[in-house]
Image (cartoon, rainbow, N blue to C red):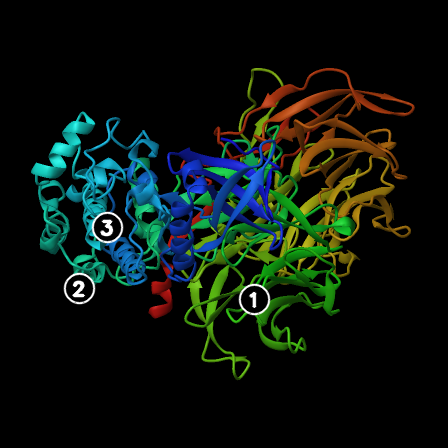
Amino acid sequence: MRLQPGTRLGPYEIVAAIGAGGMGEVYRARDTRLDRDVALKTLPAAVTLDAAQRARFDREARTLSALSHPHICPLYDVGVVTMPPDDDPVAYFVMELLTGETLAERLQRGRLPPGDVLRLAAQLADAIAAAHRHGLVHRDLKPGNVMVGSSGVRLFDFGLAKDSVPAAWQDEAETATTPPPVTEAGLAVGTLPYMAPEQVEGRGVDARTDIWALGCVIFEMATGRRAFVADTPAGTIGAILRDEPPPVSSLEPAAPPGLDHLVATCLAKAPDDRYQAAHDVAIHLRSLIAAGSAADIPATSPRSHRSILAWAAAAAAMAALITAFAMRGSPDETGPEIAFKLEFPSDTYDIAGRPPAVSHDGQSVVFQMGSSSDEGGGLWLRRLSDSSTRLLPGTRGALAPFWSPDDRHVAFLSGRPDERELRRLDLSTGTIRTVTAIPGGNGGTWNQHDEILLSSRDGLFLTAAASGPARALDRRPNVETPLFLPDGRHFLYCLLEANSQVAVMLASLDDPVPIRLTDASYAQVRFVDPGYVLFARDTTVFAQPLDLEQRRLTGSPFALVDDVGPGNRRALFDASATGMFAYRSYTDRQAPMVPSWYAPGPQRPPEPALPAGAYSMMALSPDGTRLAIGREASPGDGNIWIFDLATGLPAPLTTGPGNDAAPVWSPDGAWIVFQRQEAAGGAADLFIRSTADPSAERVLLGGDAAKTPTDWSRDGRYLIYTSRDEGILALPMRDGAPDGDPEVVVSWPEGVGAGHVDPSGRWMAFRRLLDGRPQLAVTAFPSGGPVHPLSADLWQWPVWSADGRQIYAQDGAFRLLALPVAISGDGVRPVGPAALIAEPDPPRPKPQRNYYTGPGPDGRFLLPALPTGDEMRTFTLLVNWQSRLRR
């Protein structure tokens, strides 16, 4: 490759090499004028230096630049520059930088389903017909020059002035090492397995030459093998001139009957015997589609997504099915709904409580996940055409991802809340750029006019997608999950209200005064064709038609998907209008479990006499005889129970409405503080009850912020809790009542939690996020101050030992370990490696119960043991889910 990154050709800056061949070199480049990435191809020196060939190139370039077709890659620009040190001229042309995979790459995985063959072939024939109408003959149609994506095919690389280039300059990997015969009519040009007889004989080419190549491509799509192939280039030439390929149906019995005749006509040896126009091929293909031949998946009536596809199906079958649907440009109106579960790498975990982000074309999903690996977690990308998820580099600590309208970029927020920035990631180059600052930002949406609407605790803000300051659009506080409607002017968003309700609002850039559409339980709103607003109440996502002209919802809402999990006041789902619904299952998050005893050493203590249940956080009494634990009866309805560990007999501590969880005992065992969420998606307040008289309950701390108690200092003076808005705080306590105002210990509001005070009452261990990666740290208590990091390997739910010489915590795989520490006058430091106490039981790649108790007075811990049959799945994806809207 001649050009190095950073080289400038006019306004284009070379970013990286893509490929090279006889017809020139291709680079990824940056258009510095329009701030976009493009594909730049340089031409061979002979074309650049020869005046006649340059003139032909210029004529064809003008013709192609005027050609606008959805299945042809557009030409943006052409030019010639002189390059030092010899001032040699370099001619280039600039086209759209396509993403996805080429048809050649797709065919490496085997043939395409019959329905996809007909659909993609029709699009390809339409593109060729459009080029022919403008006087352009491609001359090198092959799978490697066809890009396959969510919108179908894109034809590229017309090889401008190609018929003036000797065959010796062609890509040697795909052409004959000895050029085919040359006649006075011209030179053989093309890629050998797709060349028509007139090409290999060096005779003149016309539109019917492209039709031959189209027949070769269709044959290969349908059968997974080339129509003409031999051991040597000479043998391939002989096959092209003499042999007839077998009928498609003989290699693929499921092929539509009419496809045999279509391919045979395209591959007639004499040009006069072929279709005379590509438009005729397109008409024939569409007639086969209309006749129902595209039904490669039998039509079935819609069924519950749980019964469509058993998770126990073989991985290979699942991959093939996903690939088939990923290749579709739009949902199959008659095909069945498909559901499958995503498994993430074993060192990942969900600490975000945020929805996934589905691309507009329905082919990709981005998830926000943490990781205990050196990469530290961030945004994970899953494409339907792939069988694995991958971490997007440079997204450590990223949150609230959303897609650009063309699905080429993922935007996200990064940094501490008060220093938050909006950034954008170019998926084709991996380049990340900062767009603007947005303190308190929590979400965004990107329209087709390259404007980004951002939500924050301070209101709604608008910024240019390229870069620039964010201007206030609406100062209404506590807004989340904005979403542009298809017109790019109107938008939806959720308003978090003081009464724990969530309002779904409609506004526009032209008139920001919002209209209240409906109420929801959690902040997440989507819009899908043909005009439905999706919102969540409890664990169900509802759909209701939107009359945009009247600015109101019509009809009645109907249940679309149930069992959708809540997280951090957000409903954990997202949807595209083109075939994907992604969500985190409430059932998976609330799988029953049984608390089990663990202790250091090889001996495992006997199981406590406790039933399985949908438990949440649990706490041992100071004397180790009782267990306080949150237990859900139904979504959003849970209470605190106290179990006698000797007998297993339960007694309810709380019985009222709401969701009670996260119990914390006072050091004398006389009181229990817990978190109560009165309404689904609402703020969580702190309550306190006497263990001697459970009827004596009172509010300890109210307000709009979600609060979670985590510890009560050994001397009884402070209750430690985490506030979503403030960080970790200490509330002075006396005789079960507040004895002053809360004091901030760690003021980082997001990414910190699980504060636990050492026996001396001088130090607090806690979890925090640093550059998106969790770690165990300590700070002075209750004054706070400098933070001392202890470990990046274990950090979940730190608890001090009774003697203050160890800190127990879980690592990213949810193993329980003990880290020995030494306390000096100015800090706490580790003094040895962490020792393993217990593995998750049963072993799981991603246990979702990241809490435990202890240790008790006898040194034992209680950890959650999950039933063996529980899959602990992470996310559910539904494909072709719109059938639910048509019921």
Q: Is residue 367 left or right of residue 101?
A: right
Helix, strand or loop at label 1? It is strand
Q: CA distance from mark 2 to mark 1?
A: 37 Å
Q: Please state if 328 lies on the left or on the right of 525 as rendered.
A: left
| Label number found at residue 678 | none
Determine whether the residue tagged by mark 3 lies in a helix, strand or loop. helix
Instruction: Report the mark closest to the observer, 2 or 3.
Output: 3
Residue 429 appearing in the image: yes
Crowding around mark 2 (Cα neighbors within 10 Å: few <14, some 14 to 19, many 20+) is some
Furthest toward the bottom, the residue is: 550
Q: Secondary structure at mark 2?
A: helix
Q: Which kind of residue does numbered mark 2 sit on? A: Ser
- The residue lying at 62 percent from left, 50 percent from top is 32
The residue where tag 3 is placed is 210
- Which residue is found at the position 12% from the left and 40% from the top? 251
* Residue 310 in view, yes or no: no
Nearer the observer, 873 or 608: 873
Residue 309 vertical position relative to residue 447 in the rendered view, above or below? above
Please state the horizontal and vertical placement of residue 459, each as a whole percent of the image. 72, 65
First in sequence: mark 2 or mark 1? 2
Amino acid of disc 1: Phe
Q: Earlier in the sequence, mark 3 or mark 1?
A: 3
Tell me the distance, in whole angstroms, between the alpha carbons under discs 3 and 1. 42 Å
Rounded to the nearest angstrom, the CA distance separating label 2 from label 3 is 21 Å
Q: Is residue 47 above or below residue 355?
A: above
> First in sequence: mark 2 or mark 3?
3
Q: Is residue 521 above or below residue 47?
A: below
Q: Residue at x 33, y 50 (%)?
A: 327
Tag shown at residue 287: 2
Q: Which residue type does callout 3 highlight?
A: Asp
Name the residue carrying label 1.
484
